[in-house]
Image: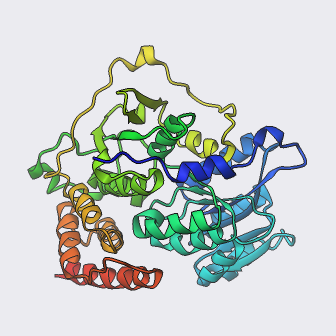
Amino acid sequence: MARKKWAIPIIICTFAPDFGKMTMKEKRQIAILGSTGSIGTQALQVIAEHSELYEVYCLTANNKVELLAKQAHQFKPAAVVIANEQRYDELRALMSDLPDVKVYAGAQALNEIVEAGPIDMVLTAMVGFAGLNPTIHAIKAGKAIALANKETLVVAGELILQLAQQYHTPILPVDSEHSAIFQSLVGEDENPIEKILLTASGGPFRLKTMEEIAHVTKADALRHPTWDMGAKITIDSASMMNKGFEVIEAKWLFGVDARQIQVLVHPQSIVHSAVEFQDGSVKAQLGVPDMRLPIQYAFSFPRRLPLSGDKLDLLKAQHLEFFEPDLKKFRCLALAFEAIDRGGNMPCIVNAANEIVNRGFLDDKCGFLQMGDIIAETMQRATFDKNPTYETYIASDAEARRIATELMKN
């Protein structure tokens, strides 16, 4: 098997700013796409803790106007954007006492705001396919990307890679696993990766049988044993589709073949991921389950800043366990690997179908195991394109959503 060098992190190391030279007058301007979600709210905690280094330029949300307005009152950004245009008047009313903060609405406003001159970094924390287009606009505008929207690389990894290299745009991973891999690679220059060890908690159903999983409810699935995340990602974690997406994301971020990525179920969630090199050495990043750490590292790279909160105490860790994932029980993970093998627009099809069934499960329209069945059938019915363009991704997303919605009604 050919060993490959890591790809995007070279761009990161080449173009990332030198934070050691920043002064109080040079606060880094950050735009947060999806500020009312789990990642967005924790990013704001990081910014508040290091207000001498960072300043919020823009906040965006899809529907949560009350929380968005509250965040705007606290951080006084230059602009806020509500993606749902029907909530624009409501947001304007809530922001009436902040005349200096510009208020926009709609998908086009998201695309335009990330291109604003003062912005240094865009944190893409939107959930789902909707994060793709504004991320592309930010890349083309040369903004550093703190990537928390994994669907961007799942759907259009090859395109994003090409654009990042073309526009010399650094992409810094925010997912805890990909941040851990990145941290393990820093200082390794061009040493080839032998294997990436991508860890997973196993979710709430790790010890359940197939028969038990068939009857789980959304309340069961939302009780993640380790992480506090939004509903969509929590359900994806329970089905392990989230881990499948992370495999695709790692393939593009680090320039490796999917066969070089091994998923390990690690219930303690202490080893956030690791890298094995050709000499047999394994480097890992360990820490408590706290998403503020990878968020802050993306903001501050290559510098490490103090972070409040609990620190890892290995004396209390007791033991670290690692298991192979059960691909029969967690079919969604197997489907993600199949999508990688087929390539082209198949990951886009899988992502679109997954967004439909994930929402369907949360709305009690399909069962937990039925999600995998619908995704698999959508993969069979949707139009496959080995060499997709951006327009292909848009069409494939729409087609797969239509197919999955129809299947869910049957």
Residues 305 and 280: in front is 280
Viewer-side residue, 173 vs 46: 173
Kindly give the residue lying farthest to the top in the view shown: 315
Measured as percent of width and height from the top left, residue 352 is found at: 35, 73
Residue appearing at x 52%, y 69% in the figure: 131
Image spot of residue 331 (x, y percent): 19, 57
Residue 363 visible in this rendered orientation of the protein? yes
Q: How is the image coloured?
A: rainbow
The picture quadrant where one finds residue 163 is: bottom right
Say which quadrant the C terminus sits in.
Answer: bottom left
User: Which residue is farthest left?
Assistant: 211
Q: Position of residue 135 (x, y in %)?
A: 58, 68
The answer to whether residue 147 is above or below residue 20 is below
Q: Between residue 61 and residue 9, name the one nearer to us.
A: 9
* Direction from residue 4 to residue 368 in the image, left or right: left
In the image: residue 74, left or right of residue 374: right
Q: How many marks?
A: 0
Foreground pick, 335 / 102 = 335
Q: Which residue shows up at 64% across the image and 67% down it? A: 167
Residue 173 in view (yes/no): no
Asked if residue 335 is positioned above or below residue 302 in the image, the reply reads: below
The residue lying at 52 percent from left, 67 percent from top is: 162
Q: Note whether 264 is above or below 314 in the view shown.
A: below
The quarter holding residue 68 reads: bottom right
- Relative placement, left or right, of 63 versus 237 is right
Identify the residue at the far front of this view. Answer: 2
Q: Is residue 5 left or right of residue 121?
A: left
User: Residue 166 in the image: x percent, y percent?
Assistant: 61, 67
- What residue is shown at x 39% (from left), y 33% (from top)? 277
